[in-house]
Amino acid sequence: MGIEDKIDIDIFKVVTRAIAESDNMEIMTNHLTQLLIVALEVKGCTIFVLNPETKELEALSSFGLSIDYLNKGPILSNKSIGAALRGEPVVVRDTAKTNQLQYPEDAKKEGIGAIVSLPIKFYGKVIGALRLYHFETWDISEQDLDSLLVLSEIIGLAMMYTRLLNALQDVKDTTNDVHRVWLDKNPKASV
């Protein structure tokens, strides 16, 4: 695949709308992985979240990859395309000619020819990674790489927004439950 820009404003609009119009992390990330595969004509896409305790990348959502590949083993942040977790994008143009992969044989078996890994950040702190997997070698354009970096930052904002929204909903539900219990115990107070 030669260098050509694939991400235009129309693709960016569709992808950012999918992020902006969802209050459910699982649905949002599932839509996003599917949209990116179609838009970029790649094999697969995975959105990972970084577990701060284990330093492992845990798949939040994935599309286009086999269950065997997804279950190949833990993705250790210091062994698997580590620069992305230092906040830098990593382009593995040819998976057959790199030592950056934690599971190179699994990538070969899966038919992955190239990987682009982008950090997902929130306030400058890496909280995950966006990975795109291609069938063949991939010379991604600088413009597309820049667009994907912006997109990964938007994903970081959306992840934190969704977590905050869900936390607020939990507080509201708990407050309503406590209020109902109190009213049940104090029926005269509801008048």
Image (cartoon, helix red, strand yellow):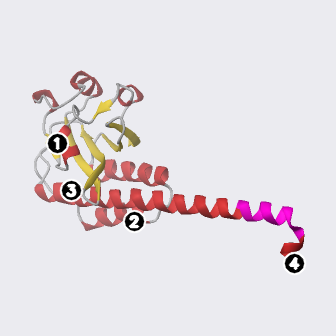
Question: Mark 2 against mark 4, which lies toward the viewer?
Answer: 4
Q: In terms of secondary structure, what is the magenta stretch mainly?
A: helix
Question: Mark 3 against mark 2, which lies toward the viewer?
Answer: 2
Q: CA distance from mark 1 to mark 4?
A: 62 Å
Residue located beneath label 4 in the image? 191
Q: CA distance from mark 3 to mark 4?
A: 63 Å
Mark 3 and 1 residues: CB-CB less than 8 Å, in contact?
Answer: no
Q: Is residue 88 visible?
A: yes
**Mark identifier at residue 17:** 2
Depth check: give the residue in front, 79 or 44: 79
> Which one is earlier in the sequence, the residue at label 2 or at label 4?
2
Q: Amino acid at mark 3?
A: Lys
Q: Residue at x 19, y 38 (%)?
A: 82
| Residues shaded magenta | 177-187
Q: Quick one: SS at disc 3?
A: loop
Question: Mark 2 against mark 1, which lies toward the viewer?
Answer: 1
Q: CA distance from mark 3 to mark 1?
A: 24 Å
**Mark identifier at residue 6:** 3
From the viewer's perspective, is residue 150 above or below residue 76?
below
- Quarter occupied by residue 7: bottom left
Q: Which quadrant would the C terminus be assigned to in this image? A: bottom right
